[in-house]
Image (tube, helix red, strand yellow):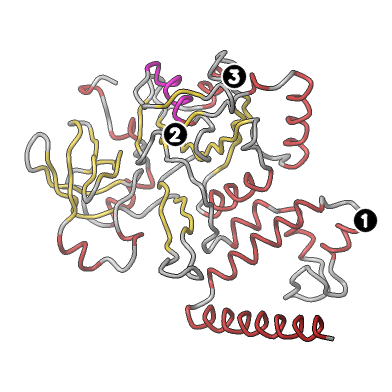
Amino acid sequence: MNREKIKNEDLGYNSFFEAERNRLKMNDFPVARVISELKEAYRVKNPKGEFFAKITGKQIFTASSREDYPAVGDWVVITELDEERAVIRGVFPRMTMIKRKYGDKNRAGEKSETQIIATNIDVAFVVESVDRDYNLNRFERYFAIAENGGVKPAIILNKIDLLLKEDLGKRLTQLRNRFPGIDIILTSVLNNEGLNELRKYIIKGKTYCFLGSSGVGKSSLINKLIGEKIIKTEDISSYSGRGKHATTSRQMYFLDNGGIVIDNPGIREVGMTDVGQGINITFSEIAALAQKCRYTDCAHTNEPGCEVIKAVKSGRLDKEKYSNYINLRKEAEYYEMSDVERREKDRQFGKFVKNAIKDLKKYKDN
């Protein structure tokens, strides 16, 4: 992009943010978009250029959680100190947001935290490769956290050069049957297959986030879209067919066609936060069945008159999809419990395990 011709709209600014700017009476202050997060600092961009920016001490003091800090994709109000430095004075309300839980309070010394992956995203590309990374349940995990934050998910099935045409057709049929309403793009960085389709999918002024595990080819795909090797990636193993993701932080890039893409480090754990709405959207078929259950608080596990269980038994509902729905819902409900409720539930479970061990010991002794 030519710097002199750049407008905020080219960086993803729209009527939502303009309305918030008017509501907050910030019209006289410059705004910028957070394009990368550094250690205790950020890179922000606006029509004047890029700035190295820090937040104020007051913001740090008043922040009650990680969500109060800027994240990649945010629009912020800034004060320009010079041509290269700025101070972030405030963060605009977010149009959309993708976040996940990581860490486990049940493990000694480890605390469960919520991490913002990116904000103000239009589409989340969930990238999986056709080799050992391929997992339908994982797709649904990503869909749930995306749709809960108001972000449309789409599938990129990468490294299709590793499969025979017949086998690829079977994978595609499997994806369409499991996810009938989700767009699917098949790609290969090795032979450039599907890259033109991916470029056409990306629209000027819209923001696209690439999500997935390490080695699925997210950075390689973005390098292809940019047209040069800007993001460092390590060589693909000839044995496993997997590249090692060298990205260590989130970074926003601007394509020649006006599209905006965000690269993310590989995500090993996709923990559920308060994503009840996202789960219901992702599993809309099950949510619709649940409305017909006999009991309004039906857990869809063993209750009489449960339409969900009935659909599973009759074969109308895929068993694996049902099982993943139950697991994700339990995980989200556990996250939403207060710390006191969690401790009590953990205590009860610990008591159950202790008694079970005693009973097993008695059984063996007899």
Q: For the view shown, which residue lies furthest in the front direction?
A: 365
Who's the residue at 63% across and 85% down the image?
351
Indicate the position of residue 102 as horizontal and vertical percent values.
Answer: 47, 58
The residue identified by callout 3 is 194
Indicate the quadrant where residue 278 lies.
bottom right
Q: Is residue 238 left or right of residue 19?
A: right
Q: For the view shown, which residue lies furthest in the top direction?
A: 191
Which region shows up in magenta? 219-228
- Local secondary structure at mark 2: strand
Near mark 3 (Cα within 10 A), the count class, few <14, some 14-19 or many ≥20, is: some
Q: The C terminus is located in which quarter?
A: bottom right
The residue identified by callout 2 is 245
> Is 171 drawn above or below residue 89 in the view shown?
above
The numbered mark, 1 or 3, whose residue comes first in the sequence reads 3
- Local secondary structure at mark 3: loop
Indicate the quadrant where residue 341 lies.
bottom right
Indicate the quadrant where residue 232 lies.
top left
Q: Amino acid at mark 3?
A: Gly
Q: Are marks 3 and 2 in contact (CB under 8 Å)?
A: no
